Amino acid sequence: MTEDTAYYITAEKLAQAGPDGVPSELRSSEHLIYSSPAALSFNSPGAQGFGVKRAALAVPGSIELLVAPGCCGRNTTILSRSGGYRDRFFYLLMDDTDIVTGRHLRKIPEAVKEAADSCDEKPSCVMICITCVDALLGTDMERVCRRASEYAGLPVLPSYMYALTREGREPPMTSVRKSIYSLLEKRKRKSDVVNILGEFAPLSDDSEIYEILKSAGVKKINEISRLTTFEEYLEMSEANFNIVVNPECRLAAGDLNKRLGMPYIELRKLHQPSQIRRQYELFGSAVGAEIDDADYLRRAEKTVNDFSEKYHGISAAVGETLNGDTFEIALSLLRSGCCVPEIFGTVSGENFVYIKRIAEISPETRIYTNLSPTMLFYDCSDQPVDVTIGADAAYYHPDAPNVPWNSDIQPFGYAAAEHLYRALDDALEGRNRR
């Protein structure tokens, strides 16, 4: 590759390099970050969708105080105009002196109280959202929140909109999940109650996981996005165990296990029926229940097989602004008979279980990173594709039909496999009608 070519590595070479040998070009911490239109929607942890600011309001009855310079807070005004958020955002703007001296920290307790007192009903808690400014200042936000809580007389919790820590041990979206469940206190647990943790919108109603849990004896399933009162939120402490459906919630689940003695099981978002079946088998063994998912399996396999017969050999580019693991989705497509010449994704150690399988099936698949400055030179004519998945992939291939696959409400399990392949079918049918 020349200096005016977008950097990529083939799946075969990346699999051979292993997790410890990921090239520096794929590590955004080792070079300048290119915020292309493809990357803007996720580059900042508060940019779009359920970023830190919106996610922090998951606790019913909560409000949020954004402590930031005007430039960081400006896009929140757009979010606050959307349904349900207009009266829940408050601002403490920082000036140049605040940024240099940290003077704004003394203003936070009073700002929290003023925001809470202005509400028609007393908030259940106040989430304080801070930015990279306080990361650079080294602010002890836990201490600031304790002081504000004592002054205002209600719980105050931190949420960190720190783009600087995106690749650290506790990224912003991991940290905010821990915060929103930190108010749960120990209660007597009930054997027929389960929490589903990880997302800020409910799983799709047609997901089979609800029926599977009920058939296993579960009578009450809690998802924070379906709760309307703070008392309902506190009742999550009564769950027998938690089901984690997003890896970014492991830290929160681990904290609940440590504080409340509440164990958790992780179920991943998968799009291969055989792997979904295996996951449910392991889940059943873990909870001591026999899982009858035969009908769901047959239906999902039929959907995937019908797609494979109809579109065998088509090419797809897979991005990362989507619901799921980019590399797992790419592997699912390859196993269904599609070609995947390009993947746009951030590589982590967890991805290698999929990257190794991708390398076996399609060793020449190119793996790009959205954040590399070399993406300025990307040319879609090098690898034309029939369809794209993810908004970022759509940016790189504007003429190909696209499946965004990034709605707030997400399918899960066999339902996810069915929805994905039907969405791909619809997109390709639309192309054929043009």
Image: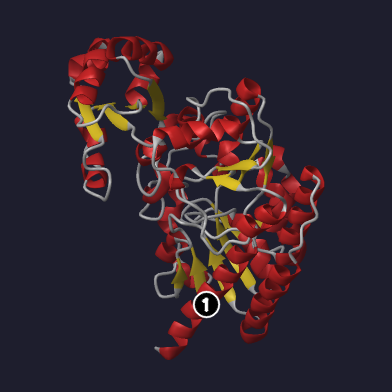
Q: Is residue 301 visible?
A: yes
Query: In the rendering, at what x and y percent does residue 268 appear?
Result: 65, 50
**SS state under label 1:** loop
Q: 173 and 385: which one is in front? A: 173
Name the residue located 50 percent from the left edge and 46 percent from the top edge: 199
Q: 24 and 94: which one is in front? A: 94
Write down the quadrant of residue 254 in the picture: top right
Color encoding of the figure? secondary structure
Name the outermost residue toward the bottom.
433
Q: Is residue 113 left or right of residue 221?
A: left
Query: In the rendering, at what x and y percent does residue 71 appear?
Result: 22, 34
Numbered-mark total: 1
Write down the quadrant of residue 144 in the picture: top left
Q: Which residue is mark 1?
A: 386
Query: In the rendering, at what x and y percent does residue 337 appear?
Result: 69, 76
Query: In the rendering, at what x and y percent does residue 288 appear?
Result: 81, 46
Q: Is residue 41 left or right of residue 29?
A: left
Classify 163 as above or below 201. above
Name the residue located 22 percent from the left edge and 46 percent from the top edge: 78
Q: Is residue 52 visible?
A: no
Name the residue located 36 percent from the left edge and 48 percent from the top edge: 48
Q: What's the residue type where badge 1 is placed?
A: Asp
Classify 116 as above or below 98. below
